[in-house]
Image (cartoon, grey):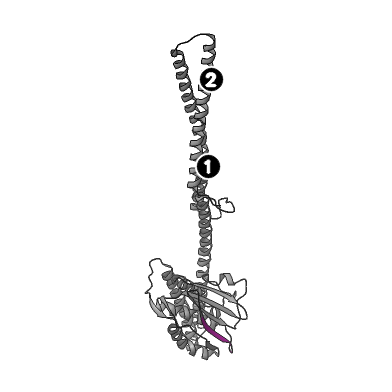
Amino acid sequence: MKRTLSFRLSTVLILYTGFILVIASIAMINATHYHFQMYGREMSEAQHSADSLNSHLEQAIIQSIGLTIGGALIVSFVLSVYIAKRISSPLISMKNLTLIMARGKRDVRLPLKSLPRDELEELAASINHLAEQLEQQEKLRIAMTENIAHELRTPLTTLNSYLAAIQDGIWEPTPERIQSSREEIHRLIQLVHDLEELQIVNSIDFQFMLEQVSLKKSMDQVMDLMRPSFQQKGVNLEKKDIPNVCVIADESRLIQIWTNLLSNALKYTPEGGTVEVKGTVRLGVVQITVSDNGIGIPSADLPHIFERFYRVDKSRSRKMGGGGLGLAITKTLVERHGGQIWAESDHGAQFYVQLPIQR
């Protein structure tokens, strides 16, 4: 059973109060009993007046009060020091950890029990989670910087080589070579566009133009626009049952999601292959599945395919692999719509998108 910090503090204070009352009762009973015994012995030896009894009662009360106050001070001091150390020790550890994290060290963690028992342990678990996220973000930042440098270096090096060859008279500026240079420039423009797009959709200030959108209509629109590209490559594009339901979404961004997924499937499906789109409704959500019988995704790569600049193609073929940002943008768009996206690979690749249905 999980016990909150307030419950534990309340229990300690109740026990502390009860302990003080027990000490007071024992002290008063013992002191009173002792003085009445003394009074009884004196009465058996000689006759005393009521003043003697009053004196013994007064001493009994004074001693019991003194013992009670002394015992209470000792107990309160011991308990106060114990409680202060128990509360301040984890807080000091958390403060020291955050200072270490602020200096740039991200691999530090607070020791945790298997299950948090109170708010302090939950706070420690949250700080550990924050440290893990910061460490992951730092790794992603470094990897992204390296990837951007690589993505920019390749076309710029190619362009520089082309222009140097033309300038030195080694190459003639033929239409084919000019076209090749323009293709490299186009890849640079597309990369910059994707980076800007990713920055926009990840911004907390970015607002969707939400409205009620027919899922079937948006999917039909994308498939009609992309069908010529599939026909040109010789890939079959099949549409199964798409539920005629509505979702609250930004229609242009929803179309962007389907376009990215279909473009990705077309890219990795060889001539003669098939890309299939179907949908199902269950438990208040609609699930769209885009599957292909292409080259598939290795199991080791599946957890990373939605990361920025990640490519299954380790050779980094630009013609085949693109900029490595399309799926990252798609994942962000789906999640900003309150949905989920994941991928599986079984005789090809299957991408699943779940979106909440408008009721």
Residue 251: name its quadrant. Answer: bottom left
Residue at the limit of the structure toward the top, as seen here: 46
The residue identified by callout 2 is 34
- Please tell me which of labels 2 and 1 falls first in the chain: 2
Q: Nearer the viewer, mark 2 or mark 1?
A: 2
Q: Amino acid at mark 2?
A: Tyr
Main secondary structure type of the part rendered in magenta: strand
Question: Residue drawn 57% across and 87% down?
Answer: 274
Q: Amino acid at mark 1?
A: Arg
State the extent of the magenta-drawn residues as a range: 270-279
Place of residue 152 in the rendered image (x, y in percent of width and height, measured from the top left): 49, 72
Q: Is residue 252 left or right of residue 104?
A: left
Residue 51: name its quadrant. Answer: top left
| Label pair 2/1, CB-CB below 8 angstroms | no
The residue identified by callout 1 is 86
Place of residue 355 in the rendered image (x, y in percent of width and height, measured from the top left): 47, 74
Q: Secondary structure at mark 1?
A: helix
Q: Spatial distance from mark 2 to mark 1, Cα to Cα?
A: 40 Å
Residue 97 vertical placement versus 55 (above, below): below
Place of residue 194 in the rendered image (x, y in percent of width and height, measured from the top left): 45, 74
Quarter of the image where the C terminus is located: bottom left
Task: Judge whether residue 173 can be spotted in this image.
Answer: no
